[in-house]
Amino acid sequence: MKSHPYPTARDARTSFCLAVNVGDQRITGDNVPEFLCAVLNFIDKHNALAELTLPFCTSGKNFLLAASPEQKNGRPFPAYRRFEGKDRTTHFYINTNHPRFFALRQGARLLEATGFTVSYDL
């Protein structure tokens, strides 16, 4: 088991699993949208969604999570999913237009932002 670093753009051609571990629980997805939704469902299951501040930035001016499916400058997310919390009143949009290596790191960031300790299996 390896903590950070996660795969990088150099590893994009290699096969790696979209999965992180939180304790003995594994969070996985077959693709970027499925993985990011699984991460958010895990956070929601543990009643920690309220700890995420919107918008949740990836870097600089780009958003991973936002109240509407657009960046700070109004440019729409090229690909997104609407996420609805288990309380049915919390919802936001996930920018899913990311390569696998980046989604893996962002999923870990979401978990860490809500207080979870994350590890990654190579």
Image (cartoon, rainbow, N blue to C red):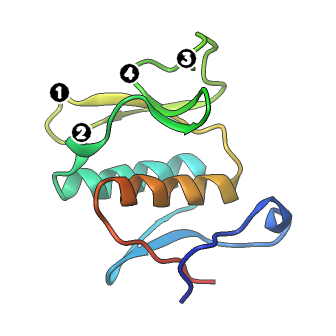
Judged by depth in the image, the label closer to the viewer, 2 or 3, is 3
Left/right of residue 4 with respect to residue 99 in the rendered view: left
Question: Is residue 61 positioned above or below 1 on the image?
Answer: above
Tag 2: amino acid: Gly
**Separation (CA) of disc 4 from disc 2:** 13 Å
Q: Which residue is drawn at the image coordinates 68% and 59% (left, top)?
A: 101
Q: Which residue is mark 2?
A: 85
The x and y percentages for residue 28 are: 48, 66
Judged by depth in the image, the label closer to the viewer, 4 or 3, is 3
Crowd class of label 3 (few under 14; some 14 to 19; many from 20; radius 10 Å): some
Asked if labels 2 and 1 touch by Cβ distance under 8 angstroms, the answer is yes
- SS of the residue under disc 3: loop
- SS of the residue under disc 1: loop
Crowd class of label 2 (few under 14; some 14 to 19; many from 20; radius 10 Å): some
Q: Which residue is mark 3?
A: 72
- SS of the residue under disc 2: loop
Tag 1: amino acid: Thr
Tag 3: amino acid: Lys
| Mark closer to the chain start, 4 or 2 | 4
Residue placed farthest to the top in the image? 74
**Separation (CA) of disc 1 from disc 3:** 23 Å
The x and y percentages for residue 86 are: 18, 42
Judged by depth in the image, the label closer to the viewer, 4 or 2, is 4
Tag 4: amino acid: Ala
Asked if labels 3 and 1 touch by Cβ distance under 8 angstroms, the answer is no
Q: Which mark is residue 89?
A: 1
Please state, as top left, top right, bottom left or bottom right, where the C terminus lies in the image.
bottom right
Q: Which residue is mark 4?
A: 67
| Mark closer to the chain start, 4 or 1 | 4
Judged by depth in the image, the label closer to the viewer, 1 or 3, is 3
Quarter of the image for residue 118 reads bottom left
